[in-house]
Image (spheres, rainbow, N blue to C red):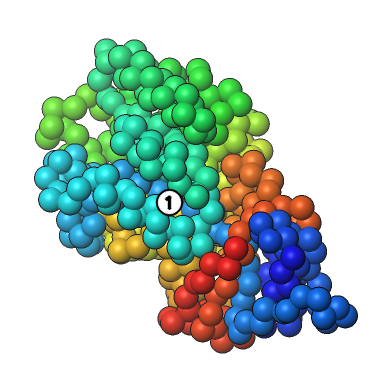
Amino acid sequence: MRIIQASYIMPLNTAPIKDGYLYIEDDGTVIHVNDITPITNQFEVEVYEGIICPGFVNTHCHLELSHMKGLVPKGYGLPKFVSQIPQLRKQSNLDPLKSLKEADRNMNESGIVAVGDISNTTESLSVKKNSAIRYHSFVEQFGLNKNNADHLLSEGLTIVEEYRSSNLSASLVPHAPYSLSPQLLKGIYSYSNGQLLTIHHQETASEKELFLDSKGDLAELFLSKGLDISSQLEGGKNSAQYALLPYLPKEQKLLLVHNTFSESADIEEIETHFSDAYWCTCPKANWYIEQRLPNYNLWREKNLKITIGTDSLASNDSLCVLEEIKMIQKNYSHIATNELLIWACKNGAEFFNYDELGSFKAGCKPGVVLIEHVDGLQLTENSKVTVLA
C-alpha cells in the first residue's frame, strides 16, 4: 500500500481536500481518500507540494497526424487547414510510425490514461495495442459523392473490424456535417445503435455560412474542387439539422467536438433533442487554426457536460491535457481548477463508460497525477505534470 499526501487532493467525485491523503494499493487501485493523519508507522507517507488528481482523459485526438507537427501555418482558418491536410500528410519527412510511438509515449508521460482517437486507417493499431493508454478509435468517414457512399461505408466497417479483432474498441463515425453526403450519414448511423458517436461540430464560421446562407470559405473551397455540396446548400438548416437531428434518437450518446462557434440557440437545440450529449473543447487547436476560443461562460451557463481534447500535432504543439487546461484558465481565470479537472478527467471517463477512471472512487484504478508549481488551487504558466501511478 502507498499513502500519498499533497497540498490538495482532487477526488473529483467529492470536494477538494486540503492537505489530504490518498491511499492506494501498489498497483494503483484506490483504497480511500481523507484528511486524517495516518495513525500507523507501517507505511512511509509520500508528501508532495501541489495538486493530486486522477489521470486525464483526452476525448479528441488525431494520433495519425503526429508526423505533421508544424507543417500547417497558424491562423490559416479551418477551410485552408482542411484543404492542406491530405497533401501535407503525404509530404512530411518524419517517419509516421516513429511519430505515433513518440506521441503515445508523451501522452502517457503527461498523465493521460485514456484517449478517444480519430482514425482514418489502421496505421496506429500496433501502437495502441502495445500502449499503456486505453484507446477508443473513432473510425472517421467523409465523402460528398452520393454514389460512393456504399463503398466508403464498407471500407470504414472493415477498419472498425480490424481494431476490434485486436481487442481494441472502435466505432464508425462521421467527420463533420459539411463533409458527408446524406447517403453516407445514413449508412454510418445505421450502425450507431449502442455505439459511441462523435462529430466535428461548428468549428468555423464558414460551416454556419455554408448551411444557412450557401456561401462562405468552405462553400467556395468545395465548389472550386468540383465537389457536390448540393445537399449542404439546401439553405435554412444549420449543421445539426442537416447531420444529426433527423437521424439520431434522443438517447444516442454523442460527443460534439470544438463547438467554437456554437451560439445559445444551437446549444439549446442539441440539448433539447439529446439526453446524453457531451461537448468537447480543444482550446489550443481552436486558437492555432481559428485564433478563437469557445464561449465557456455560455457552456457553463447551459450546464453542459464538457470534456477536453488535444486535437492533433498538425494543429497543436503538444498532446497534453494539462496545457489545454492552462489555456482555458489563462483566458477564463474565474473557472476553478477543480471544475476544469472534472472536464479533463471525470466527464471524459463517463462519456466512454470507463467506470474505473476519472475519479478517486474506492476500488477504481484511475491513475494518479501530481500537478506541481501551482498557486494554491490556481494553475500557473509553470505548472507541470508528474505521473505517480
In the picture, which quadrant includes the C terminus? bottom right
Q: Tell me residue 262's x, y (percent).
A: 46, 51
Q: Residue furthest front?
A: 42
The answer to which quarter of the image holds residue 297 is: bottom right
What residue sits 44% from the left and 39% below the top?
Answer: 129
Looking at the picture, how far across and down is residue 59, in whole percent?
49, 49
Q: Residue at x 56, y 28 (%)?
A: 195
* Residue at image mark 1: 258
Q: Residue furthest right?
A: 39
Instruction: Give left or right: position of 93 versus 159.
Output: left
Viewer-side residue, 183 vs 346: 346
| Closest to the observer, 75 or 39 | 39
Residue under the image location 13 percent in, 27 percent down: 226
- Residue 36 seen by the camera: no
Left or right of 41 in this view: 89: left
Along the line of sight, the residue nearer the viewer: 129 or 256: 129
Q: Is residue 4 visible?
A: yes
Residue 215 on image: x %, y %? 24, 40
In front here: 329 or 124?
A: 124
Q: Is 92 situated above or below 276?
A: below
Q: Is residue 240 left or right of residue 24?
A: left
Disc tally is 1
Q: Callout 1: few (<14), some (14-19), or many (20+) C-alpha neighbours within 10 Å?
A: many
Q: Residue at x 15, y 41 (%)?
A: 90
Where the N terminus falls, by quadrant?
bottom right
* Local SS, label 1: strand
| Amino acid found under the numbered disc labelled 1 | His
Q: Quadrant of residue 213?
A: top left
